[in-house]
Each structure stands twice: as C-alpha cells, then as structure tokens.
Image (cartoon, coloured by chain):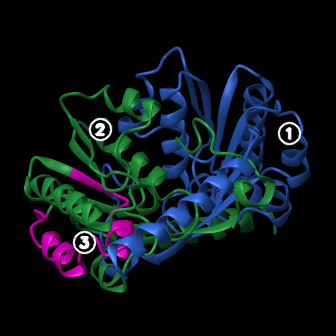
Chain colours: A blue, B green
Amino acid sequence: MTEEQYRKKMQRRKEVQEQRLQERSHEKGLIIVHTGNGKGKTTAALGMVLRSLGHGYKVAIVQFIKGAWEPAEKAVFSLWPAQLEFHAMGEGFTWETQDRQRDIETAQVAWNKALTFVRNPDYKLVLLDEVNVALKLGYLTVEQVLSGLDEKPADSHLILTGRGAPPALIERADLVTEMTLVKHPFREQGVKAQPGIEY
Amino acid sequence: MTEEQYRKKMQRRKEVQEQRLQERSHEKGLIIVHTGNGKGKTTAALGMVLRSLGHGYKVAIVQFIKGAWEPAEKAVFSLWPAQLEFHAMGEGFTWETQDRQRDIETAQVAWNKALTFVRNPDYKLVLLDEVNVALKLGYLTVEQVLSGLDEKPADSHLILTGRGAPPALIERADLVTEMTLVKHPFREQGVKAQPGIEY
C-alpha cells in the first residue's frame, strides 16, 4: 500500500469512527459488573474510583468480605476525606469465620449500609466490592440486591465486583466484564501475594 | 448440614487455604499483561498504580497511543509529584494521524522513554499503557519489546496493556488476564463514554 492509499484508508476509517461516536449520544448511570476467575475485578473498580475522584465526584466503597482495608489502600483512600467514604464491613471468608449465621448477619448489615449510599444522589459512584461473593455464598439474596438496584438514582453508577455474579444480575447490568484467568503466578510459579499488585 | 458440621467443613477448608499460602512462598517482579476486548485493561492497571503509590513506591506510566492525559487522570496523578512519572507519548490512533511513518517514529520515541523507566531499579512499577496496540499495529516489533523486558530488574513489576497482545508476549508474561466483553452499553444502548467510567 502506498502512503497515499494508506492515508485514504485511514480517512475512511476516521469517518466510520466519527459516525459511531455520534450514535453514542446519551449519558446513563450504569450498573457495572466485574466478574470471572481472573485478577482485576476490584483493581479495575479502583481505577474508576480514581477517575471519579479526579472529576471531583463523591464516591462510596463498601467491602463485603474483608473486615479491614489493606494499609496501602487505606493510605490512598484517605487522601480524599471530603469525597470518599470507604467501609470494610465483612469479617473474612467463610472458612475464616466458620459461623454461617454470623456471616449472614454481617452481610446484611453491610447491605443496609450500602443501600444508604446507593440511594443517595450525592454519590456519583458506589462500589460494592466482593458483593457477588456474598451473593454466591447465600449471605444476600439476588432478589434483595436487584430490588436495591431499583433505588439507584438515574445518573449514578454502581459497580458490583466478585466472581460468580448470578445470571439475573448480569441480565440487569449495563456493562459486564469477565476477567478471565489466562496465567497466574500463584498457581504456576508459587509466587505469593505482593504489595502493589494484590494489596 | 448442622452448624457443627458446617463449622468442621470450614475448618478443613481453612487448613487447605493455609497450606496453599505456605506453598506460595517467594516474591518476584512480575510481567503482567491485560488484554482482550473488554473494558478494564487500563483501569485495572491504574488500580495497581494506586496500590503501589500507597506503599510509597515510585511508579512510571508511559501511554503509547494517546497524546494527552484526560484532565481527571492528570489531576489525580499530580497528587504524587515525588513518586509518579506519567508521560503521554502517542499522537492518537492511526485513523487520527493518517501518517503511518510518523506513527512508527512516535512509538519508537515512546519506547525509548519507556526503557529508561523499565531499566531503572528505582521504579517498582512501570505501566506501558496501550503498548499492545502499538505492537499490533506494527509500530514496535515483538523482538524489541521482549528484549526490553530482559532489562527489567528482578524485583520490579511491569504492566503491558491493550487488546491483541501477541502470543510471544503472553508466553513470556507471569500474570495474564483477558478482559472479556460480556455486555457493553456503547454497543447495546448507544451510551457514550462517560466521566469517571471511561476517562
């Protein structure tokens, strides 16, 4: 292809791109799901939190499984005291607590806390971290979560992370990404969780 | 299952988990690839950047396709002047520039800039954003990038993002996640790119 042919081809491609952008005309508060067995579900949600904070939006994070933030995450989150609310409401995985009834009660408390942010139009983005795991373990019901989604203001975004997102949630969501594990050094090389990468 | 049976089952699961953690004994600077057609490749890398900054590490970001940072990203990145270097070295997609030779030169300049961070042991994490796209378009060669990976210090992490990561790069990487598009509101609902989510 000559340089001139190349330029013409790209000129046409540009027109197609511009046409596409025109068709994508409206804004909408999204229900976003990050699921799958690969890494990056929470991490990608944190990237959206970061962008939203950069826009000056108020953001809330509720963590459903872990009972405390990792120190590095806490240090970073604390940089936005007026914009960011973050609550670690879990008590650990079920094999850590070993008490199913208590796990259910803990998840229900977290869910009620989450709802206060989901309903509140001041929060442009709400991240329900690992909520899909609480659903998968039966600590929360799908009906209860879907009914909570109804309370989201039209222009707020909500992210639900964790493996095993139930089909009814995927059906309901606007943007769903499955993080697919291709290679992982935990499994294949016996490498442990490392600062900056996993926490 | 009685509460007691449940407790015993989770007790056994806890032992398995602890055994696994013991087997994952060492640390290693990772070559990480985020690829696939889904959303979250750059966003998940930004989450790792955030965690690393929280640990006090120095981090560098080189963006290979776009020529400028989005204002919200720039505002956030600027919070860590002593820890974070960020450079947008591209000039846009090939249908924007319409000049293949210039695109190649631009990518080569970006690659040389990236190498100065990749080699430098002061940088614990280096993010080469959209570098896979530059590879896919032939602006950089796979051999050149693989040879650059050889220069990474043993305990530094390197993230390469973008769709279409070449097989030789996946083979070489330690941690590979494919972001798989399940549902996307651009395509299905004509929703446009929104602040906090896409930029």
Specify whether A142 is left or right of A26: right
- Image mark for residue B53: 2
Q: Position of residue A171 (x, y in %)?
A: 84, 61
| Residue displayed at 86% across by 39% down | A148
**Residue that numbered label 3 is attached to:** B140
Mark 3 and mark 1, same subunit? no
Residue A99 can be seen in this image = no
Q: Nearer the viewer, residue B144 or B85?
A: B144
| Residue displayed at 23% across by 77% down | B141
Counting residues from the start of the chain, the first of labels 3 and 2 encountered is: 2
As helix, strand or loop, the secondary structure at mark 2 comes to helix
Specify whether A131 is left or right of A80: right
Q: Residue furthest front?
A: A4
| Label 1 to label 2: alpha-carbon separation | 34 Å
As helix, strand or loop, the secondary structure at mark 1 comes to helix
Characterize the local packing of mark 1: few (<14), some (14-19) or many (20 or more) Cα atoms within 10 angstroms.
some
Mark 1 and mark 2, same subunit? no
Q: Nearer the viewer, residue A91 or A121?
A: A121
| Residue displayed at 38% across by 56% down | B97
Specify whether B149 is left or right of B62: left
Tell me the amino acid under the disc marked 2. Leu
Characterize the local packing of mark 3: few (<14), some (14-19) or many (20 or more) Cα atoms within 10 angstroms.
many
| Label 3 to label 2: alpha-carbon separation | 29 Å
**Residue that numbered label 1 is attached to:** A148
Q: Is B126 part of what is drawn in magenta?
A: yes
The region drawn magenta spans: B125-154
- For the N terminus of chain A, give its image quadrant: bottom left
Characterize the local packing of mark 2: few (<14), some (14-19) or many (20 or more) Cα atoms within 10 angstroms.
many
The chain letter under disc 1 is: A
Q: Position of residue B38 (x, y in %)?
A: 58, 64
Give residue B183's quadrant in the image. bottom right
User: Which of label 3 and label 2 is nearer to you?
Assistant: 3
